């Protein structure tokens, strides 16, 4: 009669290509969190303009650019010197801002 070794089954499960691929995938957590800050700043800025009667039609791209610069500056001031990930670039943030929310994560 054959008996199954639960430890061997678990070790085999850990060696599957899917588990290995998930462990190596870099999701860019700092870039995404920085993009969330930029999006929040942009939305709050547009809302403040709307409440104060400031017309910003046609200025959305410029406002998004400034929101990215603001988020990068905040990231640079708040990041600890021992963090290993490089700060996000302007292009990365701008790309994340233009994606739908479902594709940002």
Image (cartoon, rainbow, N blue to C red):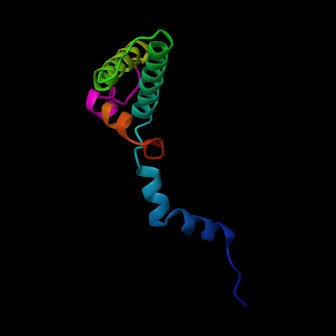
Which residue is at 50% across, 60% downward?
A: 19
Say which residue appears at 41% left-offset and 24% top-offset.
38
Residue projecting furthest to the bottom: 1
Q: Is residue 48 above or below residue 88?
A: above
Does 98 lie within the magenta span? Answer: no
Residue 22 image offset from top left, x and y in percent:
46, 54
Residue 88 in the magenta stretch? The answer is yes
Which residues are drawn in magenta? 82-93
Find the residue positioned furthest to the top: 52
Q: Which residue is at a point 68% across and 70% down the rendered structure image?
A: 6
Rendered image quadrant of residue 60: top left
Q: In which quarter of the image is residue 69?
A: top left
Q: In which quarter of the image is residue 13?
A: bottom right
Judge left or right: residue 15 versus residue 82. Answer: right
Residue 71: horizontal and vertical position, in percent? 39, 20
Q: Which residue is at a point 39% across and 32% down the rendered structure image?
A: 31
Q: Is residue 56 left or right of residue 52?
A: left
Q: Which residue is at the front of the view, 65 or 31?
A: 65
Of residues 34 and 46, the one nearer the viewer is 46
Question: Is residue 60 depicted above or below 95 in this figure?
Answer: above
5 or 89, nearer to the observer: 89
Q: Is residue 56 left or right of residue 102?
A: left
Residue 101 at what x, y percent from top left? 47, 41
Q: In the rendered view of the protein, which quadrant contains the N terminus?
A: bottom right
- State the predominant SS element of the stretch in magenta: loop
- Count numbered badges in the picture: 0
Q: Is residue 18 above or below residue 31?
A: below
Q: Residue 93 appears at what percent x and percent y? A: 34, 31
């Amino acid at each position: 009669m054959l008996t199954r070794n639960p430890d061997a089954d678990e070790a085999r499960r850990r060696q599957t290509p899917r588990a290995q691929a998930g462990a190596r995938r870099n999701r860019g957590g700092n870039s995404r969190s920085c993009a969330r800050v930029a999006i929040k700043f942009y939305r709050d800025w547009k809302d403040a303009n709307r409440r104060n009667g400031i017309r910003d039609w046609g200025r959305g791209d410029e406002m998004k650019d400034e929101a990215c610069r603001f988020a990068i500056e905040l990231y640079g001031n708040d990041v600890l010197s021992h963090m290993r990930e490089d700060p996000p670039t302007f292009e990365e943030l701008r790309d994340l801002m233009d994606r739908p929310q479902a594709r940002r994560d």
